[in-house]
Amino acid sequence: MSSGNRREEKGFILVIAMITLIIMAIFLPSLVQMNRNDTKWAIKQKQSTTAFHMAEAGLDRGIWKLQESDLIWNWASTGAVIPGYNFDVIYASTGSSGEMEGEYSVKFSSRSDGNGIIIQSAGRDKTTNEVRALEAVYTKSAINAGLTSRGAFRYKSGLNIHWGPVVNFTSITEAPSQKYPRKITKGSIKEQAGWYDENANSPNGHDFYSDWPDPATYDYNTYQSRLGNPPTIDLDAYKAIAKATQMPRLKGKNSHGAAAGNNPVLSGYYDGTEDLDLGKADLVVPINNATPLIFYCSTCVLYLDGTGDLDIKDVASQVRLRAIIVKGDFDMNANNTPAYSARIPVGARTEYLHPTAMTDEWIAKFAGTGEGNVYNIPDEVQIHAYVYVGGDVTNSGGGDPAMVGGIDIVGDMTGNNMIVYYDSTISTGILATNVKPTIQYWREINAATLNLP
């Protein structure tokens, strides 16, 4: 190769090197900055993830505490402060190496309707003091039914249960006359005109614990062993809430004055010394000319202890309570009560999947309003509550009395007529001793809005 060519080649290499240096001079600062940003982002992500994990650990600690005992759950559901769970204690968390990673604090609060517990948790990354917060709502659904029957049950012809199933833990000894709602029992349902089932051999209707067919061939599920045992209602917890309740003093069933056994006075607790008339009450003590009772308190409990009976009859009274506990019998009839509305639960349509029920009930009455929307009830609603009856249920005065919520019957149904509109929010707040809490939702919340330690 000639010397001229070698000089040309060296010159070309020199140009390439200079161009490379120029490019590096232009882009190297940007590359360095990008690397710095990536490093900062990675550190920030780790720190943010640490704070989030601390908040998750707080939620885990909260649900662990709620499952510690039924007493803890019941206290928290009434708004009582649980030490260590009111943003009053900071819990430390360490990594596998033993070094402190972060910390968290937890708070319990009751929902405004008394149906469930809110857990709030805030987690902090100790290296940066970054804080993130989470919130979760837990409920206990002891009974998901419009009517629950614990013993042998006569399904009277005038009994109408809407929006939720009928659950029976023994057998149904009188055949229902409607093809709604779904009926589930551990035993049989008395046959009538070739309908329902008194034979333990399959088929026993549709499996309640599987997707119900649409349209459905049956409106029942008999001999269902998976139903298990009835929930154990925490009567002591309800008694405590009733004693803390403030409500008008009720009239004695067979007297002209205030009922005996109200202790504390003007609370929701009665010892059963005298039967009660829920239809009349007054704020004055003693009651002389009792008036119809119009009283709305979704966190209040009325508790009639002993063998006391409860009547709500022949009056235009209407009450909205968290629960009514009656150890004796419960008697109600219809009267000219104020107009009332309630929200149709999501999933209510499932109770009307038999073709007859779909046409005559769901489409004719409820489809126009739809699930999740507020329905103006055409019936005379006297009670909106969870109602526990230790004795029998009747309506000796006749008519078609209605209630919203759910009714839980230990005895029998001896009255012919009653209408129940199931309220799923009532069922989630029922206090029982053999039910575990379940999560309804969780979300991230703004930590700056919390009163943190």
Image: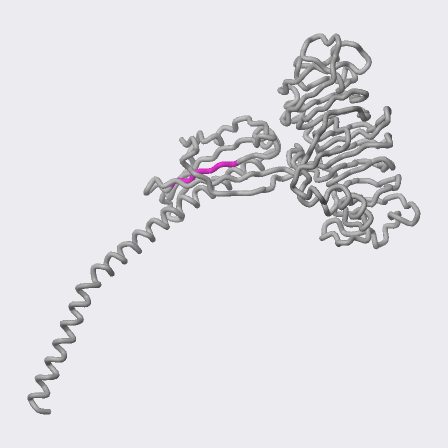
Q: Dividing the image into 4 quarters, which one contains the C terminus?
A: top left
Point out residue 136 in the picture as x, y percentages from the top left corner: 53, 40
Point out residue 344 in the picture as x, y percentages from the top left corner: 69, 39
Q: Quadrant of residue 415?
A: top right
Residue 6 seen in render: yes
Is residue 267 rendered magenta in the image?
Answer: no
Q: Is residue 47 above or below residue 340?
A: below
Residue 184 seen in render: no
Nearer to me, 74 or 166: 166
The residue at the far right in this view is: 193
Q: Dividing the image into 4 quarters, which one contains the N terminus?
A: bottom left
Point out residue 283 in the picture as x, y percentages from the top left corner: 67, 12
Nearer to me, 216 or 203: 216
Number of marks in the rendered image: 0
What residue lies at 79% left-to-right and 34% top-to-bottom? 419
Q: Is residue 17 above or below residue 373?
A: below
Q: Which residues are magenta?
A: 119-124
What residue lies at 76% left-to-right and 51% top-to-bottom? 207
The residue at the far left in this view is: 3
Q: Is residue 260 left or right of residue 102?
A: right
Is residue 123 rendered magenta in the image?
Answer: yes
Q: Is residue 425 above or below residue 243?
A: below
Query: Majority secondary structure of the magenta segment?
Result: strand
The residue at the far bottom in this view is: 1
Q: Quadrant of residue 67?
A: top right
Q: Is residue 448 left or right of residue 335?
A: left
Point out residue 384 in the picture as x, y percentages from the top left corner: 70, 29
